[in-house]
Image (cartoon, helix red, strand yellow):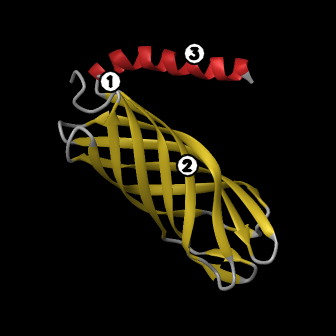
Amino acid sequence: MMRKFQRTWVLVAGLMALMGPLAHAGVGLDLVGSGTYGLLIPPNTGRSSLPGGGLFLNFNLGSKVQFDLGALYMTRAWNDGVTQNSRYAEGQAGFNILLSRALFINLGAYYNYYLNNQVVLSGFDWGFTAGLGLRIPLGKSVGLLIYPQFHKAINALSYNGNSITSTEVAGFLGLSFGMPGSSR
């Protein structure tokens, strides 16, 4: 357990050293843990979240706009009498509009690819995202990221004979390297 902890901190220290030059080039990296909560679900079905995580890369397009790419590993737990889990990879692309050094609005799109699916969902999930992020500075180019995001699917999935459209809130918490306005 201690070796795993040490390896994690070596990785974080390495990323911090690497992000200095990348921050000057206008690139930021967010390492996040995630969770989701479904808002619209099939009748008599509950949906909750299991831990997940991933990263976002932010590319400055100007002083107030970033292009944002995300690669995430997400999980869902469904309960319609029996708890069933789904694991999926999520890709995101969008734009961050910087309201200040610490606060931003995100607008974009997502695509989910199911890796393991006990839930008998068929199809894939894609749609729009909108979020409000807060990067609390912990140093010149490192911050704590708190980032709730709304997901609204465009397509319908099939679930036990029902057609559903996924709508959920995802929450991300993590470290942000190469903060906007930090030595740029």
User: At numbered mark 1, what does the secondary structure look like: helix, strand or loop?
Assistant: loop
Seen as rendered, the residue at the extreme right is 82
Residue occupied by mark 1 = 139
Observer-side mark, 1 or 3, equals: 1
Mark 1 is on which residue type? Gly
Which of disc 2 and disc 1 is earlier in sequence? Answer: 2
Q: Residue at x 38, y 43 (%)?
A: 68
Q: Residues within 10 Å of mark 3 (few under 14, many from 20)?
A: few
Q: Amino acid at mark 2?
A: Ser
158 left or right, relative to 56: right
- How far apart marks 3 and 2 lie (CA) works out to 22 Å
* Distance (Cα) linking label 1 and label 3: 18 Å
Q: Is residue 102 above or below residue 116?
A: above
Residue 64 x/y as whole percent: 19, 42
Position of 38 relative to 142 (above/below): below
> Which of the two discs, 3 and 2, labels the residue nearer the N terminus?
3
Disc 2 crowd rating (10 Å Cα; few below 14, some 14-19, many 20+) is many
Would you name the residue on which mark 2 appears?
34
Where residue 55 is drawn, which disc sits there? none
Spatial CA distance of label 1 from label 2 is 23 Å
Q: Is residue 89 left or right of residue 22?
A: right
* Number of the label disc, if any, that sits on residue 10: 3
Above or below, comparing residue 179 to residue 9 in the picture: below
- Mark earlier in primary sequence (1, 3): 3
